[in-house]
Image (cartoon, rainbow, N blue to C red):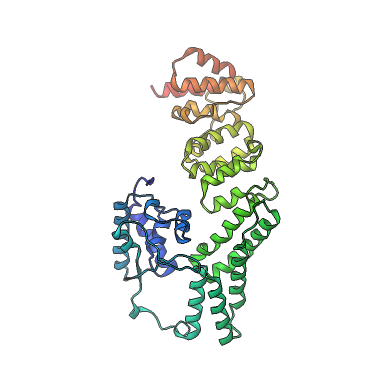
Amino acid sequence: MPTASSQPGPDKLIALVERLILEQQRVEPLALLLAAGVLAHPDYEAWRSGHRQWLQDALQLPLADTLALLRRAGAQARAAGLVPTAAQNHRRGDDSAPLESGPSVELQRALATAYAPPPARRQLDLFYDSADGLLEQTLREAVLARRLPAAREALDKLQRRDPAYARGSDWRRLIDCLARAGHTPGAAPCRSKAAALLRDIDEITPVAGTLLGPQTWDCLVLLWAALAQAADGLRFDPAEPRLHASSALARLGRWQEARAAIMAEPGWRDLPDLLAPYVRACQHSGDARAARAALLASCWSHPHTAERILAAGDCPDSRLAAHWQAFCDLEPPTAAAAASAAMLATEDFPAWCLLVDPGLAADAPADATTDPHRAAAYGAAKALATAPDDLDQRRALGAAQPALLAIFLQRRRSAG
């Protein structure tokens, strides 16, 4: 079912189309849907690999909105001087059968239409027009389609024609990496296989970027998928966090599986290095409540880790990140309160959040810290989020943490 709330706005669409033209000198409809978040890469990858019959039911926008988006992008591409051209959507691998997007003929037609410079505008390029240039294009297409025997054949022909071909060794390294990734490991977790794949990824990523440009990910996704499989079931090692399956699954955008891999790790809640990946996996898989609860609870169990996540520019929860900034900027409300209360610490942040943003109570963790004073303050703050005039809870909050009560009362007075 579609989950995206709306199409990209005009400014965002203009920026997306301009970026595609700058990077690829053309506008491919599927590349646009991926960049706009209308299509998730795992669904696209499954369709291109023949593991998903249709793409239409994976769209994150209703069909009518998706078609409208593609029409607007096409109009912008034409305004930029590009012309419609055929876009070929074939299954990857040796069986390069044409792919169908779904029952909508209009969507099938839209996805088969790309926009490229008109032939008259193409600058004369002697290499491009030469037999060597055509062979390199054949090689590139075979690699992206994962037809590795055809890619080797094209590379061999190219090197026979030009033994000094400068990029030959890079292409061969890339093809060899993809071939190794295609050898499926056994059912048991294999740390040596996972480590070898990770080395391949690190070494070949810049090479693939030079050879394939913006389409690099279409190639590297095969290596990351192989790593996720090889690492499946490996215990988490803080010294090698990328050898845990959740790391590769997150890189692939398979967020539900990444979350499951973390939760399958014995004692994962006691491993601070898994906190940020867990929060991010929850957030991206649509479970913002679980992400928020885990992040608030980490303020008690792993306060330093929580601080780093909340202060980072890419904090998965922008609402909590904004509250954290305000919390760090706090000053004691009065001199008397400053004298009588301990300084607020990260462990007080969950209770403070509920006092300044009662709407967070629905997402707050059920279990509190084992520190009795902070547990009492948190319980009182949670109660005051729904019953702010409860005098017993105000007294409980003041007894546990007077500074929090002073902040609560000051905000009540300011609100009138």
Horizontal side of residue 416 vs 198, given as left or right? left
Residue drawn at x 47%, y 27% as measured from the top left? 361
Q: Quadrant of residue 271?
A: top right
Horizontal side of residue 54 vs 153, given as left or right? left
Quadrant occupied by the C terminus: top left
- Give the percent coordinates (x, y) of residue 401: 58, 21
Residue 345 appears in the picture as rendered: no
Q: From this view, report whether residue 409 is shown above or below residue 283.
A: above
Q: Quadrant of residue 413?
A: top left
Residue drawn at x 57%, y 56% as measured from the top left? 225
- Give the percent coordinates (x, y) of residue 197: 64, 60
Q: From this view, report whether residue 67 is shown above or below residue 86.
A: above
Residue drawn at x 64%, y 24% as measured from the top left? 370
Residue drawn at x 44%, y 18% as measured from the top left? 387
Of residues 242 and 51, the one nearer the viewer is: 51
Horizontal side of residue 262 vs 45, given as left or right? right
Q: Which residue is situated farthest in the top direction here?
A: 392
Tally of marks: 0
- Give the percent coordinates (x, y) of residue 250: 55, 50
Of residues 277 and 178, the one nearer the viewer is: 178
Residue 28 appears in the picture as rendered: yes
Q: From this view, report whether residue 354 is shown above or below residue 139.
A: above
